[in-house]
Image (spheres, rainbow, N blue to C red):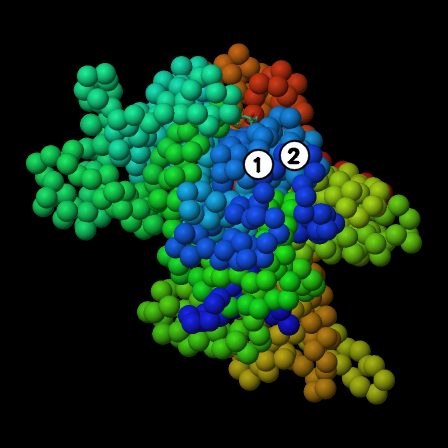
Amino acid sequence: MLSNLRKFVVSHKKIPILHINNMCCSKMRASLQRLKSHVPLGRNYSSLPGLIGNDIKSLHSVINPPIAKIRNIGIMAHIDAGKTTTTERILYYSGYTRSLGDVDDGDTVTDFMAQERERGITIQSAAVTFDWKGYRVNLIDTPGHVDFTLEVERCLRVLDGAVAVFDASAGVEAQTLTVWRQADKHKIPRICFLNKMDKTGASFKYAVESIREKLKAKPLLLQLPLGEGKAFKGVVDVVNKEKLLWNPNSDDGKDFVRNPLLEMSDPELLKETTEARNALIEQVADLDDEFADLVLGEFSENFDLLPAEKLQTAIRRVTLAQTAVPVLCGSALKNKGVQPLLDAVTVYLPSPEERNYEFLERISRLLLPFADQHIEIPSLTAGNIALTVGLKHTATGDTIASSKSSALAAARRAETEGGKKHRRNNEAERLLLAGVEIPEPVFFCTIEPPSVAKQPDLDYALKCLQREDPSLKVKLDADSGQTVLCGMGELHIEIIHDRIKREYGLETYLGPLQVAYRETILNAVRATDTLDRTLGDKRHLVTVELEVKPVETASVMPVIEYAGSVSEDLPTASQEAIENGIHSACLQGPLLGSPVQDVAVAVHSLVIHPGTSTTMISACVSRCIQKALKKADKQVLEPLMKLEVTVTRDYLSLVLADLAQRRGTIQEIQTRQENKIITGFVPLAEIMGYSTVLRTLTSGSATFALELSNYEAMNPQDQTVLLGRRSGLTQVL
Ligand SMILES: Nc1nc2c(ncn2[C@@H]2O[C@H](COP(=O)(O)OP(=O)(O)OP(=O)(O)O)[C@@H](O)[C@H]2O)c(=O)[nH]1
């Protein structure tokens, strides 16, 4: 039943309400094994926030903070920008941990999966809860690698705010754009944190400019850096005109001083900060009428008299309205700038009641997450994030409602409101949690259990993994009977393989990784077919005439048209049967057995003998389409990847030469500090194993990001080579 409730949420204002979502089950599987132990092993943790022993009274206050004091936030960024390091500092300064974890040492709290610690990257989102200056912060660290985009999206859709972390020497990078767009889609207010200010080449100005230009966002500079690169020693708080300096002898960054900027001691810096503050005030006044009235009325003569709190309140309003983003800076690794970032989270990001989601749910067992540790809790108020266990039929992307009737009521309400088109966006859609957009997998490979007897165990493991991660698709190859894994990238499939071994104890074998191609046709073709079969004493007879033609939709869903004579009096069941036949025929094209895209099907005539089953109608239509597709001029479409390579000048020509050999086309080469940024397009088939190649070519100094751009027609020579190779491979399979 629950899986049917995908789109429904229920709102109820009076009853204490609980916000539960499947997102919270991230890492659930792995964590369940550790559920018994609440005492973290290995790391030195403080007690859980506000918790004195296991006293249930203190627990109650821990789990029921006033809703206005709750912040549900995510940390998002391009790979390696420093999300996990920043999270570690946050946990340390909030008192959640007693020692600083290090990504490079593999002992961070949120990267607790074995693969994450080994590779130093985040794969799954992890939730942690801590307190900061009277606020309860539920924080989720999300992955930066493009293979795990879905993981980011499933978190974003239930978060109230986010911190976007940037590498200050690189500014906006490829994956930053993707996560930024996702946050736009889910209307998440954001704060930007320009991390790595200590790194050689770090540039506050450059990073801010890239936010303005590439993200088309309006940055509000709430801080200025004191020094850059090796000289970075602190920040200036523009709103309060204060200087924050970290004690160079403190090895954990806890020790810092906040002093007002004075004419006597810092004339230049004071002048610069006053100019920045005035610019900030003007910028906010431009975006917020209420603030503009205040500034123009009382403070137009002297902005210095404007109290910091008034400016903060207005900054908060524009942040929540998403008309601008506050920008802060620091160095998580060097322990500078993280405490003010936490202050900004509490001051500028919204509480759950300032967002439009309202939920009601009652569940038998609730757990509060602390990365891979949990404590069981009796209840939860609105706006919190919790885990629940034992849901057998839910998958990532579902919204859980309290009962079928309440979900149906919400659905009815949504439908009614949906009918009134002009109100649709602001009323009905507000009730629904946006669904997770599941990207199309671009790679596939076969997977085999160690023995036939273990196939059910493998099926079970894959079923569980798929519920957690819908971007993983599992198919059965009808010809070979083998199980086929389809995923987002090489790393994605590798991690799934590894998890099956570690979490389900199954040593499986992967076939060679293959690219998911598509097919299309180049000309319109007509075909007719008749199916005449007698089963028992019943005759099934269908004759169909149809035309398959190319259209530009960039979709594997065929456009379906009916001639007037066909659509007249066509029973719904027959229409469904025709459409099932069309869809199933388009799943396997005649060239490679890949999905067919960019086609329209026009049904010109259809004669159905009375008593013919719908299955026979589908079979006849499907066969007729396959006949037409075979007759048409055909074309293989291959996934074309958008590629961004960051490389030092010395290796630029080597990388370009290598890309030319990979059928790559270069779009532009930009200069960013000491680096060159190459952007272009490369067919996915040519870029397998590129991380190893690039590492070898550039002695490990270059980085790259890949993202599916579109499916493109292969040129005739490449297509012939591929078809030749595939026919050989098909026999092997
Ligand atoms: N110089 C410098 N290096 C940093 C800073 N913060 C993080 N790093 C380093 O950058 C690398 C990546 O840091 P992470 O914290 O794992 O980055 P991430 O964004 O969580 O990475 P993914 O989760 O894999 O996307 C590590 O080697 C860190 O030590 C910083 O402020 N300055």
Residue ID at (44%, 76%)? 413
Secondary structure at badge 1 equals loop
Q: Amino acid at mark 2?
A: Arg
Percent position of residue 313, x then y: 27, 46
The mark tally for this picture is 2
Q: Circle 1: is it few (<14), some (14-19), or many (20+) Cα within 10 Å? A: many
Q: Which quadrant of the figure shows ligand 1? A: top right
The label on residue 587 is none
663 lies left or right of 169: right
Answer with the quarter of the image where residue 630 lies: bottom right
Residue designated by label 1: 97
Label 2 to label 1, Cα distance in Å?
8 Å
The label on residue 43 is 2
Residue ID at (61%, 66%)? 363
Percent position of residue 237, x then y: 30, 30
3 vs 110: above or below: below
Q: Are marks 2 and 1 in contact (CB under 8 Å)?
A: yes
Q: Amino acid at mark 1?
A: Thr
253 lies left or right of 711: left
67 vs 106: above or below: below
Closest to the observer, 74 or 728: 74
Name which of mark 2 and mark 1 comes first in the sequence: 2
497 vs 339: above or below: below
Closest to the observer, 718 or 429: 429
Closest to the observer, 8 or 547: 8
